[in-house]
Amino acid sequence: MAEEGKTYVCNICGQEVKVTKAGAGTLVCCGQDMEPKEGP
C-alpha cells in the first residue's frame, strides 16, 4: 500500500508519483511496482 505524502518512482521510465491520498493496492508503471523515492 502506498503511503500518503511519499513520492514513488518507476525504475524503468523515471515517472514520479506523489501520493495525496492513500488507498488499497500498489502503484504500478511499465508492468512493475513503483519504488519509494529515496532522499529529498
Image (cartoon, rainbow, N blue to C red):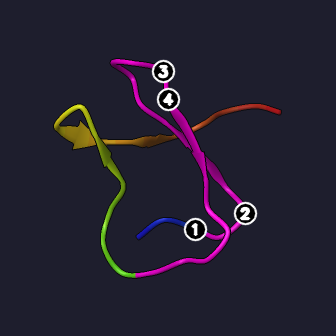
User: Does the residue at mark 1 contact the one at mark 4 (Cβ under 8 Å)?
Assistant: no
Q: Which mark is residue 5?
A: 2
Q: Which mark is residue 15?
A: 4
Magenta span of residues: 4-23
Instruction: Work out how far the residue at label 3 is from the one at label 2, CA to CA, in angstroms.
Output: 19 Å
User: Does the residue at mark 3 contact the one at mark 4 (Cβ under 8 Å)?
Assistant: yes
The residue type indicated by label 4 comes to Gln
- Label whose residue precedes the other's in the sequence (3 or 2): 2
Q: Which mark is residue 14?
A: 3
The residue type indicated by label 2 comes to Gly
Q: Mark 1 or mark 3: which is in front?
A: 3
Mark 1 lies on a secondary structure that is loop
Question: Which residue was labeled with disc 1?
Answer: 3
Where does residue 39 sit, x and y in percent of width and height? 75, 31
**Quadrant of the image occupied by residue 27:** bottom left
Instruction: Work out how far the residue at label 1 is from the one at label 3, CA to CA, in angstroms.
Output: 19 Å
Mark 4 lies on a secondary structure that is loop
Instruction: Work out how far the residue at label 1 is from the one at label 2, CA to CA, in angstroms.
Output: 6 Å
Queried whether the magenta region covers residue 14, the answer comes back as yes
Where does residue 20 sit, x and y in percent of width and height? 67, 69
Q: Quadrant of the C terminus?
A: top right
User: Does the residue at mark 4 contact the one at mark 2 (Cβ under 8 Å)?
Assistant: no
- Label whose residue precedes the other's in the sequence (4 or 2): 2
**Quadrant of the image occupied by residue 6:** bottom right
Mark 2 lies on a secondary structure that is loop
Instruction: Work out how far the residue at label 4 is from the one at label 2, CA to CA, in angstroms.
Output: 16 Å
